[in-house]
Image (spheres, rainbow, N blue to C red):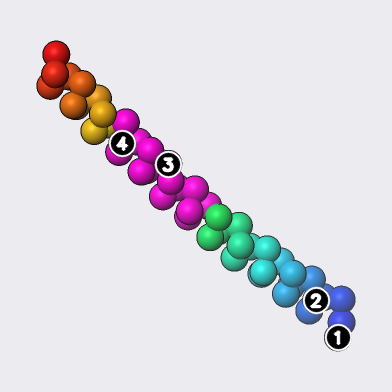
Amino acid sequence: MSIKSLDKRIVSKFGSSVSSFARTFIKIKRKANFKKFVVKNEFSRKL
């Protein structure tokens, strides 16, 4: 096992975990924005 192949494996593992984390983060952010939007609409309707 050469150092380069090991490096590549680590990098690809790290990259995939980072991208999955980013996707999850974006999903959470979108949900939060959507909730804010809904709350704002409800609030403006009550006024």
Q: Position of residue 2 (x, y in %)?
A: 87, 82
Residue 29 drawn above or below residue 9: above
Q: Which quadrant of the structure image shows residue 44?
A: top left
Residue pictured at 79% horizontal, 71% vertical: 7
Q: Residues within 10 Å of mark 3 (few under 14, many from 20)?
A: few
First in sequence, mark 3 or 2: give its number.
2
Q: Nearer the viewer, mark 3 or mark 4?
A: 4
* Closer to the eye: label 4 or 2: 4
Label 1 crowd bin: few (<14), some (14–19), many (20+), radius 10 Å:
few
**Residue at the location (61% across, 62% down)?**
17
Quarter occupied by the C terminus? top left
Secondary structure beneath dot 2 equals: helix
Q: Residue furthest top?
A: 47
Q: Which range is magenta?
A: 22-36
Q: CA distance from mark 4 to mark 1?
A: 50 Å
Amino acid at the residue labelled 2: Leu
Q: Write down the residue under mark 2.
A: 6
1 vs 3, front mark: 3
**Gap in angstroms between the C-alphas marked 4 and 2:** 44 Å
Distance between the Cα atoms at labels 1 and 2? Answer: 7 Å
The residue that disc 4 covers is 35
What amino acid is found at the position of numbered circle 1 in the picture? Met
Is 7 or 35 nearer to us in this picture?
35
Image position of 44 (left or right of 20): left
In the image, which is nearer the foreground, mark 4 or mark 1? 4
Mark 3 lies on residue: 29
- Secondary structure under tag 1 reads loop
**Pointers 1 and 2 in contact (C-beta within 8 Å):** yes
Residue 13 is left or right of residue 7, and the answer is left
Most prominent secondary structure in the magenta stretch? helix
Q: CA distance from mark 3 to mark 4?
A: 10 Å
